[in-house]
């Protein structure tokens, strides 16, 4: 079974949510919006590169634009293996939380 790190899971979910507009800046913005905290560029790109190597993501290079100083965007897309990894993470969370109704933090038994 593939076990994603929490960061990998969050980034894969961000890529999925962004659909055809998933590139470094938008992924970082989506992750920050989902988690509610700032992430460094390295905290996003290192896991992205690792997940490309593992076959969970593919990349496509867009056209260079003047706005970006002639640089092209690198778009990311989930592969079938990436989708399976996310489904496995979801199933693991459900299994881990199964049968836990109350953590006793609200004064309940």
Image (cartoon, helix red, strand yellow):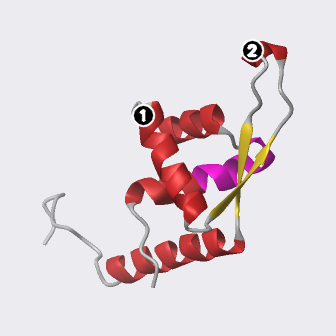
Q: Nearer the viewer, residue 21 or 76?
A: 76
Above-or-below relation of 89 to 14: below
The magenta segment is 13-21
Q: Residues within 10 Å of mark 1 (few under 14, many from 20)?
A: few
Q: Nearer the viewer, mark 2 or mark 1?
A: 2
Q: Earlier in the sequence, mark 2 or mark 1?
A: 1
Callout 1 secondary element: loop
Q: Is residue 18 magenta?
A: yes
Above-or-below relation of 102 to 10: below
Helix, strand or loop: magenta stretch:
helix
- In this picture, residue 103 sits left or right of residue 60: left
Q: Residue at x 45, y 85 (%)?
A: 1
Above-or-below relation of 99 to 107: below
Can residue 78 be seen by looking at this rendering? yes
Residue 97 at x, y percent in the picture: 34, 76
Q: Quadrant of residue 29?
A: top right
- In this picture, residue 103 sits left or right of residue 28: left
Residue 101 at x, y percent in the picture: 29, 75
Q: Is residue 43 magenta?
A: no
Q: In the image, which disc is placed on residue 39?
A: 1
């Amino acid at each position: 079974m593939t076990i994603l790190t929490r960061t990998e899971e969050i980034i894969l979910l961000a890529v999925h949510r962004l659909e055809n507009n998933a590139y470094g800046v938008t992924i970082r913005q989506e992750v920050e919006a989902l988690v509610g905290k700032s992430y460094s560029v390295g905290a996003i790109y290192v896991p992205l590169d690792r997940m490309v190597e593992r076959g969970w993501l593919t990349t496509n290079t867009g056209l260079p634009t003047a706005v970006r100083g002639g640089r092209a965007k690198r778009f990311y897309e989930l592969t079938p293996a990436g989708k399976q990894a996310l489904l496995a993470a979801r199933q693991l969370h459900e299994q881990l939380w199964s049968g836990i109704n109350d953590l006793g933090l609200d004064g309940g038994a």
